[in-house]
Image: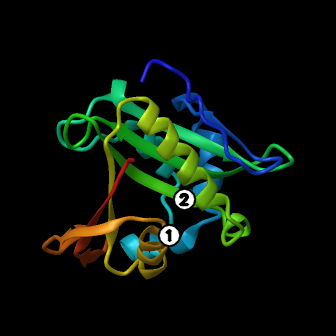
Amino acid sequence: MDQEPTFHIDLPGYTVRRLKPDDAVILQRVFDRCPDYAEIVEGEGSSSAAAEELFESLPPGGSFSNKLVAGIFNRVGEIGGVLEVMKHYPEENIWWIGLLLLDPGMRNQGVGRNLLEAFMEYAHGNGGKAVMLGVVEDNRSAYRFWSQNGFDLVRKTEPRLFGMKNQPVYLMQRKIE
């Protein structure tokens, strides 16, 4: 994505900015403070290279030019979360959320919901017709969050291996109106 994100979170003191691979050290702090996520998804703690891997990974058929990694910064300028998205994936005018991860101290305060709504407006303004994502079966709190924020179950996949865990993925979608 050539342009910097033009959305902002509608919460006083919080900001969103595009992250680049040079920001991996900063982003790694989020993964280090969120071992619960890696445990739920992969059955083991966060990798010390999780941030680098996020910048380097693409889904099949994805393009780095359509990838956006945005950091969420708190009132004192510390990174507290990440939103990773892919434009035109898995098809034209669909945006794919690969990851929305918030520091435990930022959860349940409306940050995720506000960030999501700001992102949905941004995607809509850039031709998005829908947003899709996948939630592993064991991540019940994430499934609840996405469901409460307008995402509907499209289908459940066959189990697949994530780290040390084999589990199905719930594919979800929300149309942009």
For label 1, the residue is 37
Residue 65: image quadrant is top left
Kindly identify the amino acid type of the residue bearing the numbered disc 2. Answer: Leu
Residue 177 seen in the current view: yes
> Residue at the right extreme?
76
Look at 42% across and 65% down and name the residue there. Answer: 150
Q: Nearer the viewer, mark 2 or mark 1?
A: 2
Residue 163 seen in the current view: no
Q: Quadrant of the N terminus?
A: top left
> Residue at the front extreme?
177
Q: Earlier in the sequence, mark 2 or mark 1?
A: 1
Which color scheme did the rendering employ for the protein? Answer: rainbow
> Residue at the top extreme?
2
Q: Is residue 158 above or below residue 50?
A: below
**Residue 49 position in % (x across, y down):** 49, 49
Q: Is residue 151 above or below residue 119?
A: below
Classify 10 Å Cα crowding around label 1: few (below 14), some (14-19), many (20 and above): some
Look at 60% across and 60% down and name the residue there. Answer: 112
**Label 2 close to label 1 by CB (< 8 Å):** yes
For label 2, the residue is 101
Q: For the residue labelled by badge 2, is the local secondary structure a helix, a strand or a loop?
A: strand
Look at 43% across and 38% down and name the residue there. Answer: 123
In space, the residues marked 2 and 1 are separated at their CA atoms by: 8 Å
**Residue 166 position in % (x across, y down):** 23, 76
In the picture, measured across the screen, residue 92 lies left or right of residue 99, that is left
Residue 99: image quadrant is bottom left
Kindly identify the amino acid type of the residue bearing the numbered disc 1. Answer: Tyr
Q: For the residue labelled by badge 1, is the local secondary structure a helix, a strand or a loop?
A: helix
**Residue 168 position in % (x across, y down):** 22, 75
